[in-house]
Amino acid sequence: MNEVRRRVALVTGAASGIGAAICRTLAGPDMAIVVHTRANRAGAEATVAAVHAAGSEAELVLGDLTEPNVAPRLIDRAIERFGGLDVLVSNAGFADRTRFAELTDAAMTHSMESIHSAFFRLARAAIPHLVAGRDPRIVAVSSFVAHAFRTDLAVFPASAAAKAATEALVRALAIELAPSGVTVNTVVPGFIRKDAGTHAAYTPAQAAAQTGRIPLGRLGLPSDVADAVAFLVSSRAAYITGQALHVDGGLVIRS
């Protein structure tokens, strides 16, 4: 009998936080994972070590996704190293709290390139391989900032625009790719605890102060988001596409 190859996942922004947690949660003997980071090699190496410990093969790739050639290079590396691609998780990005009045053209473009354009390029390069994959899945990691516009919460104009554009592209792709069996969804985290020493839009004290605005009364953990992603990329989510799954403790209640 022919040996069935492992499913192959590419997770961007996987050196810390949500991306690293996604890799750890997906890891297992039946999965190979391409671990991407822009520049945090030490963090990505720690993620690779955790993935290996769980029985997965792993490949570390560095690259700035605002550069147009990086996304296709990541996909090519997955194919070269593991022979296919079944799961794309577009997680890399950052939060920009700059007020609209102070936003420069360059800052707005940087948010769009880092989040929306990166997802666009990754999906475009991945689709020809995903349609031939096993239980093929695309998941984009969005943010509550594209949904929560209240006077008691900080507003992130550039990040909100980039994440909202990504969610719209997810819905369009879900329709286009449905005949091929590729599902396309987004996970929408709320306030998530950051790893110590990593970039955060809020200080730990500011983040802790948000718990009073969260119905479940606590900050989310990276593992909370990773569990949602793991479900969406599993065979159990085969009939779910074009959806935004909020993982925010009730911060954003939608009808």
Image (cartoon, rainbow, N blue to C red):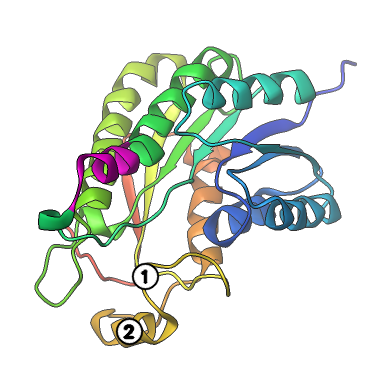
User: Is 128 above or below relative to 34?
Assistant: above
Label 2 packing within 10 angstroms: few (<14), some (14-19), many (20+): some
Label 1 sits on what residue type?
Answer: Phe
Q: Is residue 155 left or right of residue 33?
A: left
Which residue: 86% across, 21% down? 3
- Nearer to me, 71 or 139: 71
From the viewer's side, name the closer residue of 51 and 71. 71
Question: How dense is the environment of label 1, judged by Cα within 10 Å: few (below 14), some, or many (20 and up)?
Answer: many
Q: CA distance from mark 2 to mark 1?
A: 8 Å
The reply to whether discs 2 and 1 touch (Cβ–Cβ < 8 Å) is: yes
Label ID, residue 123: none
Task: Estimate the x, y position of residue 126 in percent, counting from the top left.
Answer: 53, 21
Task: Tell me the SS state at disc 1.
Answer: loop
Check disc 2 and give the amino acid type.
Thr
Location of mark 1 (residue): 191
Residue 79 visible in image: yes
48 with respect to 106 (left or right): right
Whole-percent x, y for residue 146 in the image: 22, 52
Image quarter of the C terminus: bottom left
Instruction: Report which residue position mark 2 lands on.
Output: 211
Query: Which residue: 43% across, 68% down?
Result: 200
Q: Position of residue 239 (x, y in %)?
A: 41, 34
The quadrant holding residue 185 is: top left
Task: Give the residues in magenta.
Answer: 103-112
Q: Is residue 74 above or below residue 201?
A: above
